[in-house]
Image (tube, rainbow, N blue to C red):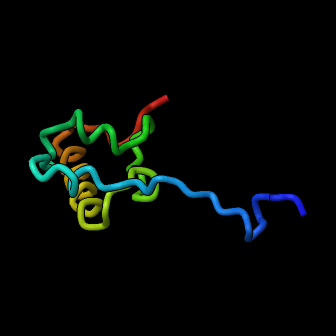
Amino acid sequence: MQNRPGNPRTRTYYKRKTCRFCEDKNLKIDYKNTGMLRDFITERGKILPRRITGTCSRHQRKLTVEIKRARIMALLPFTVHD
């Protein structure tokens, strides 16, 4: 029998993404640090989900609030005009 992706005998192990804020306790989430916040939004201005960035739920919530604050203060764009 061939090993196909849907085959239960085939296991693909991968390194689980870890939260960068949990690993480095000195790294703070702040709306004024737009360079760091840009890593968590797409080029169109959408907030990237946890499953892509690897952040934990607590830091993802904090990150979302700070991105929205930076948008209100006009430090980050809401959307990108074409």
Question: In the rendering, at what x and y percent does residue 35 appear?
Answer: 23, 33
Q: Residue at x 15, y 45 (%)?
A: 31
Question: In the rendering, at what x and y percent does residue 20 appear?
Answer: 26, 50
Q: Which residue is drawn at 20% across and 47% down?
A: 72
Residue at the extreme bottom of the image, as rendered: 8
Foreground residue among 11 and 6 = 11
Left or right, 30 with respect to 12, comes to left
Foreground residue among 42 and 5 = 5
Classify residue 65 by image quadrant.
bottom left
Classify residue 37 by image quadrant.
top left
Left or right, 64 with respect to 7, comes to left
Q: In which quarter of the image is the N terminus?
A: bottom right
71, above or below 56, in the image: above
Residue at the extreme top of the image, as rendered: 82
Q: Which residue is drawn at 24% across and 67% down?
A: 58
Left or right, 55 with respect to 15, comes to left
26, above or below 56, in the image: above
Classify residue 57 by image quadrant.
bottom left
Q: Which residue is drawn at 17% across and 49% down?
A: 24
Question: In the rendering, at what x and y percent does residue 66 appear?
Answer: 20, 52
Question: In the rendering, at what x and y percent does residue 15 appear?
Answer: 46, 53
